[in-house]
Image (tube, rainbow, N blue to C red):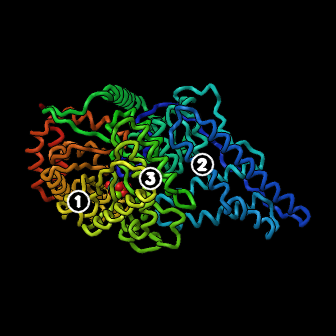
Amino acid sequence: AARFGGGDVQWVTAGKGIAIGRAHLILRGMTEVPQYNIIADELAAETTRFDNAIKASRRQLEQLRSAIPENAPTELGAFISLHLMLLTDATLSREPLDIIQEQKINAEWALKLQTDKLSQQFDEIDDAYLRERKQDMLQVVERIHNNLVGQSNELNLETNLLEDTVLIAHDLSPADTVHFKEQRIAGFVTDAGGPTSHTAILGRSLDIPSVIGLRNARDLISENEWVIVDGINGVLIINPDDTVLAEYRGHMREYKNRKRALNKLKKTAATTEDGLNIELLANIESTEDIKQLHSAGADGVGLFRSEYLYLNRDTLPTEDEQYEVYSTLIKKLKGKQLTIRTVDLGVDKNPRWFGQNASPNGSLNPALGLTGIRLCLAEPVMFRTQMRAILRAAAHGKVNMMWPMIASLTELKQCMVHFETAKRQLAERGEEYGEVSLGCMIEIPSAALTVGSLLKLVDFISIGTNDLIQYTLSVDRGDDSVSHLYQPGHPAVLKLLQHIIRTANRMGKSVSVCGEMAGDSTYTRLLLGMGLRRFSMNPSNLLTIKDIVLRSHTGRLEEESARLMRNEDPEKTDKLLKDLNKMDEAV
Ligand code: PEP
Ligand code: MG
């Protein structure tokens, strides 16, 4: 047996769960790129040939997008739209035409030259998320190329695929996965892709065990060979022996049983053993995510990241456009609470229109630059437009609005002034608006340390542990080379968390955690022990957290976590957390 991943090497786990099945290799990919010169007389015909390939690609993608099955992941439409956008962008649809004309070469060759240039540009991008969009670009190029050479773009899976088929591909594009649910694939493995690649995101949403980014797995696996895809630990095992197979069959049963048991908790209230109600909320990024929120039985939205309204477009979203989105959210939530965070751009999320105004990617320390609320305060028109849209939507149901990346009381006061202006502008227009609760994120140490004075001005706060950890420990949250230093359980982080939660509770103000820590079961009991009663997380973690809440006694946890809080040695945190997490189990 050969084993990939595990130990020190963690591959990207995309879809959780375990699949045991027979490998089916997808040997598609770009065929050889033909290279020849074109005589002057035939240049016009060659450019038409390229144009036709673009048109065909466009038709195919539009057709795919309009026929997405009901049970496909909600992101799929957006991903295919992104491919359409890349396709129609001048860099792919026009510039190759110039190359054909200037260098008098065939369309496939021109496309290849242009792709090499674009690939290099992508590789030079600092930001990991944007860099990974290269994969999307290559998938679009592959489609154009196939249309040029008259090769099918369909992932031709036989209809009689066995249920235990594990697909092994170099890469899978969003278009390839459109029918995965119907095709009942057991698992999939790819060589390409990173943690934020669309293949990984789709793997998670499809809920199909998968491991991606294995680099050369496809070369090492033969058709029909037995493989185990462990999407929980990011491990792929080829040709396992009977002992390993038996072990994994056991793991698989356990995983399925646990999932079934968790699903039964959907309608159960999240009440602790000592009778406290804990609010479990969802982090969402689009109106589509509400489906997932309801199916996980969340109490509402604790964080709507509004950035996605601003990305993948050339202009700012208008007030009306935003009003529509926020109103739709309210409607779809059917009375459940909604917390909208005003736009938090910069660092890892840079819209194109941002361009020359500020260039966080060009600055040395983008995370310390003009991001989040700083950018909003520098762009008051954009800021107030969003707040007016939120206020107008609130006429249909109460909204909590929160400001990201607040570092000081000064900024909070400035936000208040803009908020009042936004209200006045609506009043002057005679526009109807509703009640909005005001809050801010606590995700910068300076805000954490002065949280008492911030709390005097707002109705609620939400702790963004993702950034709070990054800034407290001085560890870039997206940098692999220092990821071992990114420790949510570092005593310094825990002290800040305790201070924030205690202060808010003492002042009778609502406090939640909406960073990843809220959905990480390792910290649920500790946070309960600190006095946290509101958790906001990716809906996929919600039932696991609820299960822990149901088996926790906050009274006992308060005492136990006090011991943990006295520790200042990061190396001891793990052991102390283990003890705390075992505690109630023994009861
Ligand atoms: C956070 O920083 O914890 C947070 C929730 O915000 P984001 O991850 O969007 O920066
Ligand atoms: Mg943040």
Nearer to the camera, 507 or 446: 507
Give the Cα distance between marks 3 and 1.
26 Å
Categorize mark 1 by other alpha carbons within 10 Å: few (<14), some (14-19), many (20+): some
Q: Nearer the viewer, mark 2 or mark 3?
A: 3
Residue for point 27% across, 63% down: 444
Q: Quadrant of ligand 2?
A: bottom left
The amino acid on which the numbered mark 2 sits, given as a three-letter code, is Ser
- Confirm whether residue 572 shows in the render: yes
Give the Cα distance between marks 2 and 3.
34 Å
Marks 3 and 1, the one that precedes in the sequence = 3
Whole-percent x and y of residue 272? 18, 34
Local secondary structure at mark 3: loop
The amino acid on which the numbered mark 1 sits, given as a three-letter code, is Leu
Local secondary structure at mark 1: helix
Whole-percent x and y of residue 379? 44, 68
Q: Where is residue 464, by image quadrant? A: bottom left
Asked whether disc 3 touches disc 1, contact meaning CB atoms under 8 Å apart, the reply is no
Q: Which residue is mark 2?
A: 81
Q: Which residue is mark 3?
A: 431
